[in-house]
Image (tube, helix red, strand yellow):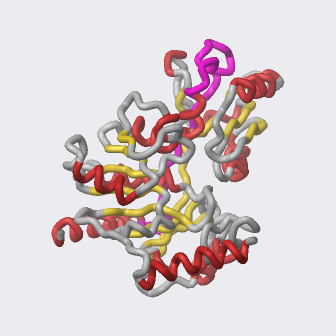
Amino acid sequence: MSWLYGLAVSIRNELFDAGWLKSRSFPIPVINVGNLTVGGTGKTPHTEYLIRLLSSNYRVAVLSRGYGRKSRGYVLAAKDTPSTMIGDEPWQMKHKFPEVYVAVDSNRRRGIWRLMTDAQTRDVQVILLDDAYQHRYVNAGLNILLVNWHRPIDKDYLLPAGRLREPFTGRERADIVVVSKCPDDVQQIDLRMMQHNLRLRPFQQLYFSRFRYDALRPFFEQSGAAPLSPEDLGEYNVLMVSGIGCPTQMRAELEPLVKSIKTLTFPDHHTYTASNLKWAEHLFSRLQSPRIVITTEKDAARLKDIATYSDASELHRSTYVLPISVEFLQDKQETFNKNIIDYVQNYSRNS
């Protein structure tokens, strides 16, 4: 089955490369952040990094497919748009960056055109495509490919045997490759080995990044609870609730910071139900005090949709959201920033 899937994907890519299937360019900087695998590379934190980098000088829009949403077609997010209408990750970005346009559309060409021409958004200056590396109907001006350090694409397999959406050769379309989720104790020789294994072309730029956990904020904002820094977690017994692409790594990174940890994990983009909440309450009740629940920003967007989670229970009051930021290794953050800004400036000037 993986062989047949790979054959179909390869034929599709050949049709695009030969011009039989058409890619469309736009007179506006379009930056695509994607991967070759199914989830787990940190697309949202890296997209948020680009938002922080660009939004102070440009009117930025984020266009996503809106995975798992109950709506169809093009939807422009407002501050009160529920996650069920736009998806958890777009909801997260809209609430963290309310000044940024956030839209969803499975047809990225139509979505870009709507952002450029609709009266509400036609002042947009830069568009970030979230998870559109395989959406080749759009010819993005800059393609950023993310690779999970813990799941190298040169050793993975095509779906359904592995997690690859397309063959290893797909990396050649990237302008920038970022190896994400690098461990804190990574050595220079390990970075060089990863660089060797990726076998990039001379024009492709390679960066390494890792996650940094920021202060945990209370999920129940009216509780009056203070944020918790990662250094303050040592006394707590933790229930980690997550529906993300790579929960095992999150647990591995939290485990040294807390007294004990138990996990309740679901598939990526899982829609939480009242029965899920009851099971979480059961597991939470078995933890010794002091105890808290830790979840991700993406999961928080979906947990808010459970009406009973707003009840003033101990579980609700004890839930904290763990924000994630991105940090580049080898002192290359300024170089990465300059490459992004130069692309936007030059593209805008040429257009």
Q: Residue at x 62, y 21 (%)?
A: 309
Identified at 19% across, 49% down, the residue is: 123
User: In which quadrant of the rendered image does the C terminus lie?
Assistant: bottom left
Can residue 313 be seen in this snapshot? yes
- Left or right: 127 in relation to 235: left
Location of residue 170 by image quarter: bottom right
User: Of 141 and 57, which appears nearest the observer?
Assistant: 141
Which of the 4 image quadrants contains residue 95?
Answer: top left
Q: Position of residue 140 (x, y in %)?
A: 36, 68
**Closer-to-camera residue (169/324):** 169
Q: Residue furthest top?
A: 312
Residue drawn at (39%, 51%), measured in percent from left and top? 63
Query: Magenta residues?
Result: 304-332
255 shown above or below 8:
above
Give whichever of 225, 244 is nearer the camera: 244
Residue found 40% across the figure and 28% down from its top: 80
Q: Residue reaching furthest front?
A: 20
> Is 351 rendered above or below residue 201?
above
Q: Confirm whether residue 253 shows in the render.
A: no
Q: Position of residue 130 (x, y in %)?
A: 45, 55
Asked if the stretch drawn in magenta spans residue 310, the answer is: yes
**Residue 343 or 191: which is nearer the viewer?**
343
Give the position of the N terminus as an image quadrant: bottom right
326, above or below 194, in the image: above
Q: Reply yes or no: does residue 9 show up in magenta.
A: no
* Residue 320 in the image, given as x and y percentages of width and height: 59, 30
The answer to whether 11 appears left or right of 113 in the picture is right
Q: How many labels does the image show?
A: 0
Measuring from the top left, give residue 216's x and y in whole percent: 55, 34
Name above or below for residue 174 compared with residue 291.
below
